[in-house]
Every structure is written in structure tokens, then in C-alpha cells.
Image: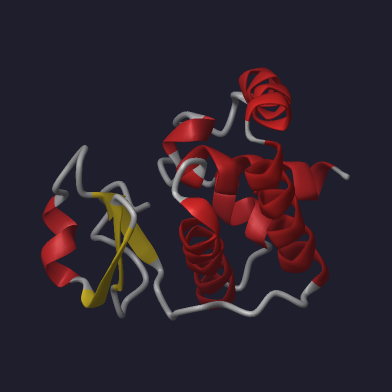
């Protein structure tokens, strides 16, 4: 199913190598954005400037398909976990681990909107938190 593939690829691209806790945290951020914006989780993933893995306009389907094949081969357990989280998100049975709606990789960047995060939690290389208005003032929000 295309929706589950979009979700699984987003979770994997953002968290492969971070283990199950990081994957579940990324899925939780997708879940809360979907709830707060009243749009499907797949639409959250493909929204402009939300997840770098999809590009500015969510147009990297071919690239993501190749990456999914690579993850299946090189990180089969992590890939299966991402697919399971995607299935739960898609069918409505997902249970988030936190109320985070934003995160960033603290080893790669320090976005200006991060100062607005509340309830910060570090999981792997990422800092998760919440911005109450649901966006980061038009800035890139992961």
C-alpha cells in the first residue's frame, strides 16, 4: 500500500540507526502533526519542507524506493519496525510515546525554532519537543 510505504520510508529516513525508540519517537511526531492539522499522516510526510528525505515538494519517490530496498537488505529488523509503525499509523492503532510535534538532529543542526520547544527529550541523535502552535513560524520543522 502506497500510504504505508510513504510512512515507512519517512520514519526510516529520519531514524534508521536510532533504534526502536527513535523510530517510535519520529512516528509520534508524525502522528501529532496529523492530529493537530487534521490531515492524513501521509500528507504530513509529503508537505512542503517538512522532511528533507522527500525534498521540497515531496517528489523523491524513486529515490525513496531505492532506499527502501537498501534498508530491507542492510537493516531488515529496523525496516520491519518502521513498516509496522507505518501500518499502525495508517490504520489508526498507533499509540504515540510522547506529544512531540517537532524534532531535530542535534549533531547536524541547531534550528532557530528549537528555542520554542517545550518538554525536550533527547533520543539518540535527535531532540524531540513540542511547539504549541504546531509550526515553527514558517521555518523548516522536522
Does 126 sit above or below residue 64? below
x, y percent for residue 39 = 64, 66
x, y percent for residue 102 = 35, 63
Front position in the image: 52 or 119: 119
Q: Which of the 4 quarters of the picture holds residue 133?
A: bottom left
Q: Residue at x 57, y 49 (%)?
A: 11
> Is residue 92 rendered to the left or right of residue 26?
right
What is the count of numbered marks? 0
Q: Which of the 4 quarters of the picture holds residue 51?
A: top left
Give the residue at the far right of this rendering: 1
Does 122 sit above or below residue 45? below
Quadrant containing the N terminus in the rendered view: top right
> Is residue 81 rendered to the left or right of residue 53?
right
x, y percent for residue 53 = 49, 33
Front position in the image: 13 or 49: 13
Q: Residue at x 68, y 18 (%)?
A: 66
Q: Residue at x 12, y 53 (%)?
A: 112
Front position in the image: 43 or 130: 130
Does 103 sit above or below residue 73? below
Judging from the image, the colouring scheme is secondary structure
Q: Residue at x 48, y 46 (%)?
A: 15
x, y percent for residue 97 = 51, 78
Does 65 sit above or below residue 139? above
> Is residue 130 rendered to the left or right of residue 79?
left
Amino acid at each position: 500500500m502506497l500510504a504505508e510505504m510513504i510512512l515507512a520510508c519517512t520514519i526510516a529516513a529520519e531514524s534508521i540507526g536510532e533504534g526502536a525508540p527513535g523510530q517510535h519517537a519520529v512516528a509520534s511526531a508524525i502522528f501529532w502533526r496529523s492530529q493537530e492539522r487534521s490531515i492524513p499522516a501521509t500528507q504530513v510526510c509529503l508537505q512542503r519542507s517538512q522532511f528533507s528525505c522527500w525534498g521540497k515538494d515531496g517528489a523523491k519517490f524513486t529515490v525513496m524506493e531505492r532506499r527502501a530496498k537498501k534498508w530491507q537488505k542492510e537493516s531488515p529488523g529496523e525496516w520491519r519496525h518502521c513498516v509496522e509503525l507505518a501500518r499502525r499509523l495508517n490504520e489508526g492503532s498507533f499509540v504515540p510515546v510522547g506529544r512531540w510535534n517537532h524534532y531535530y538532529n542535534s549533531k547536524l543542526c541547531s534550528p532557530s525554532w528549537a528555542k520554542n520547544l517545550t518538554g525536550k527529550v533527547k533520543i539518540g541523535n535527535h531532540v524531540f519537543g513540542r511547539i504549541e502552535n504546531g509550526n515553527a513560524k514558517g521555518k523548516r520543522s522536522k
